[in-house]
């Protein structure tokens, strides 16, 4: 039996919303994106309805920005605008 890829359920949008900016790179380049849920915004407690932000697929694939915190058990991405604002690159 063939296993279904976990990416099969991932909804990829062809166009990035004009009024939003990617939280990772800080731009609104019109390229493929996905919606990523925002912690603490599920007001119904069912896990189905929450706020989400569009994020460029290419940013999620940028290994230079991806990090893992093994103590907390979370994968995260350095946000370029915040890194630049601190004088680091």
Image (cartoon, rainbow, N blue to C red):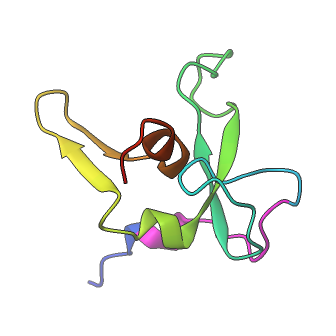
x and y, in percent, of residue 57 in the image? 55, 69
Q: Position of residue 36 (x, y in %)?
A: 58, 47
- The image quadrant of residue 31 is bottom right
Q: Residue at x 19, y 34 (%)?
A: 73
User: If the image is split into quadrants, where does the N terminus sit?
Assistant: bottom left
Left or right position of 55 against 31: left
- Would residue 9 be counted in the magenta stretch? yes
Q: Nearer the viewer, residue 11 or 78?
A: 78
Q: Residue at x 35, y 44 (%)?
A: 76
Residue 25 image point, x, y percent: 57, 57
Q: Is residue 58 above or below residue 28?
A: below
Looking at the image, residue 84 sits to the left or right of residue 48; the answer is left
Which region shows up in magenta? 7-17
Q: Quadrant of the C terminus?
A: bottom left
Q: What residue appears at the point 59 percent right and 23 percent down from the top-left corner?
A: 46
Residue that lies at the very extreme toward the left in this rendered image: 71
């Amino acid at each position: 039996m063939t296993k279904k890829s976990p990416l099969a359920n991932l909804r990829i949008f062809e166009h990035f919303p004009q009024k939003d900016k990617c939280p990772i790179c800080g731009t609104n380049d019109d390229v493929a994106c996905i919606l990523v849920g925002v912690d603490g915004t599920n007001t119904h407690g069912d896990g189905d309805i929450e706020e989400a932000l569009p994020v460029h697929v290419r940013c999620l694939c940028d290994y230079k920005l991806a990090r893992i915190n093994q103590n907390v058990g979370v994968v995260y991405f350095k946000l370029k605008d915040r890194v630049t604002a601190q004088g680091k690159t």
